[in-house]
Image: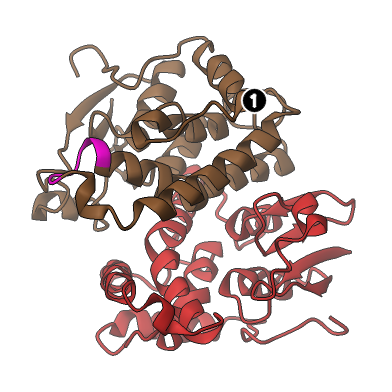
Chain colours: A red, B brown
Amino acid sequence: MHTLYSMQGSGNCYKLRLLMAQLDVPFRLIDVDVVEGETRTPDFLAKNPNGRVPLLELPDGRLLPESNAAMVYLAEGTAHLPEDRFARAQALQWMFFEQYSHEPYIAVARYWRMFAPGGPDRKADRFPEWTERGNQALAVMERHLAERAFFVDGRYTVADIALYAYTHVAGEAGFDLAPYPAVRDWLARVAGEPGHVAIDWRPQGG
Amino acid sequence: MHTLYSMQGSGNCYKLRLLMAQLDVPFRLIDVDVVEGETRTPDFLAKNPNGRVPLLELPDGRLLPESNAAMVYLAEGTAHLPEDRFARAQALQWMFFEQYSHEPYIAVARYWRMFAPGGPDRKADRFPEWTERGNQALAVMERHLAERAFFVDGRYTVADIALYAYTHVAGEAGFDLAPYPAVRDWLARVAGEPGHVAIDWRPQGG
């Protein structure tokens, strides 16, 4: 069985819980509390020297950090990852967009509003930049989705999961999605996909 | 022929120039000056709504932004991208590490020291964080390379190119590589690969 080292509430960890639920990949969940420093213990750093969750452990014990890389691994050979060479590269393009142009603003703002000890006041000087850059990312998504049902290949793929993870909780980061109707329609389409589970979902016994 | 929209000096753009040189993929280079705002013109935003270089244009006109996604596209079926499912995911893991945990500190510090109008003083309050996080990334690389010649699969792949691009010029970003001997040895190995070209290399006529 797979093991997922994960923090409940984390969008990056949710990506893998959602994908494994939809792919019917059974897994056990091990909670790792980032706020309590549990990703910085010697035991955890031995598993992932970069000290982050999610971390996917395969049934044979091999370890794979980085949410989007682990999603690609799990989705190989399934309908969630395009087979066509160019469409696969486009799925990666949107996953790199997510990690570089979206997550560092929307997810980080959400972390400081929702989870961080001391609260958002500790980072008050950073919120204007996060708000501006986060809205730039949402505007890029809006423009792309105005003409498309999903990000790549005309269908639901890991690129949609990557971007759904923090977009659907952008309100918790202080973002207003009212100016992004195509994004809101797409969020509803993703939530309507077969086997969809919510961000607080855990596997049975997990 | 492929077309690469690129800024000379950019490590992200260099990744694709280096890979295409090594794969013998002919391409023409179109210079786009980020500092002069040339990635924010209506013409360029029509090609890449996220307003960034590099941008790869395929011979048939299809467009692919995001340096690491474009590298994977170009390297499919070559020795530069592992065939094995897990090794491919590990190559992606290190490319996501590069874009999330390395580039935003080392490349951004270099940009403000070397290229940005107004110079590094405009971002003096950010350099301590960039220095700390950049050194964390270098320490993760050092630990990994202490036991390995290359990042993935025991051989030179796109993961090495992705991390080489800004690591070999980390001095320009104010980083001292003396504490990272395994990283320095790996830099020399990468520079010794067949067909290696330097960051200022341009294709003939480009």
Q: Nearer the viewer, residue A90 or B71?
A: B71
Q: Viewer-proximal residue, B42 or A86?
A: B42
Percent of width and height locating residue B111: 28, 41
Residue at x-position 68% and y-position 30%: B145
What chain is tagged by disc 1? B
Q: Residue drawn at (50%, 51%), measured in percent from left and top?
A: B133
Task: State left or right for residue B81 relative to residue A103.
Answer: right
User: Would you identify the image quadrant in which residue B205 lies?
Assistant: top left
In this rendering, position of residue A30 left or right of residue B137: right
Question: At which x and y percent is residue A52?
Answer: 65, 60
Membership of B130 in magenta stretch: no
Secondary structure at badge 1 equals helix
Location of residue B183 by image quarter: top right
The residue drawn where x is 28% and y is 53% is B124
Q: Amino acid at mark 1?
A: Ala
* A7 lies above or below A93: below
Q: Position of residue B109 (x, y in %)?
A: 34, 44
Percent x, y of residue B188? 54, 15
Crowdedness near tag 1: few (<14), some (14–19) or many (≥20) residues, C-alpha within 10 Å: many
The answer to whether residue A52 is above or below residue B15 is below
Span of residues in magenta: B113-118
> Looking at the figure, which quarter contains the N terminus of chain B?
top left
Q: Is residue B116 magenta?
A: yes
- Residue at mark 1: B182
Left or right of B178, for residue A16: right
